[in-house]
Amino acid sequence: MDVVTTRAVLAYVSDKPAALGEFHRVLKPGGRISLAEPIFRDDALKAIGLKKLIDTQDPHSEVRVLHRLHRWKAAQFPDTEEQMAQSPITNYSERDLLRFVNEAGFTEIRMAFHIEILPSNITSWDIFVGFSPHPWAPSLSVILAEQFTAEERQMFEQFVRPAVEARQFTTTDRMAYLTAKKPAG
């Protein structure tokens, strides 16, 4: 093969070094790879941080909102370091991706890491609750239906919906763009 191109594929592969080794194997000498991979590790770190914050609070204190926010985020991303290490979408960073490509034997490695933090363009509550940050994550509407009581759903919506409709949320996208070459000989 002359070229291997993937977009948001390695993020869902458990053994990224093995996949990159296969890319290297099937390429002819001088062949190239072009990858674009989302980096979700920071999202898991936020869920872990929220869990740690809740765990340090007095269980009788008024941290119900934090508990609900954690339940939402933990349904979409790992919330322990062990789970993060086991999940293909969070078991690597952009630096790990660079290292994996290098260790697979590629040369002329170039990576651009883009982070975009923008105001959310979602101002409709129905669209917001239907959104999923990645294909393996349930939408907020599913999480609310399956993990919240009717009273909790109502309180959660009263807290979050005004912020959504006032565009107070931001979206953060992290994407690694990488190209490399299999040595010619």
Image (spheres, rainbow, N blue to C red):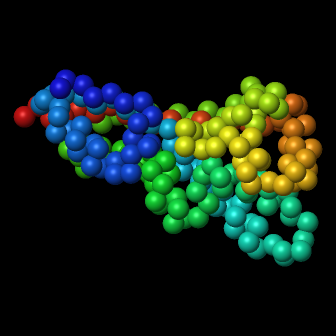
Residue at screen point 42% across, 30% down: 7
What is the residue that sits farthest to the left in this orientation? 185
Residue 125, picture quadrant = top right
x then y, percent, for residue 170:
73, 36
Q: Is residue 117 left or right of residue 101?
A: right
Residue at screen point 16% across, 39% down: 25
Please tell me whether residue 160 is drawn above or below residue 123 in the rendered image: below
Please tell me whether residue 114 is drawn above or below residue 78 in the rendered image: above
Residue at screen point 34% across, 48% down: 16
Residue 159 makes an appearance in the image: no
Please tell me whether residue 183 is drawn above or below residue 146 in the rendered image: above
x then y, percent, for residue 3:
24, 25
Q: In this view, does 31 lie to the left or right of 52?
A: left
| Closer to the camera in the image, 115 or 20 | 20
Q: In which quarter of the image is the N terminus?
A: top left
Residue at screen point 76% across, 74% down: 56
| Closer to the camera in the image, 150 or 82 | 150
x then y, percent, for residue 30:
15, 28
Q: Quadrant of the C terminus?
A: top left
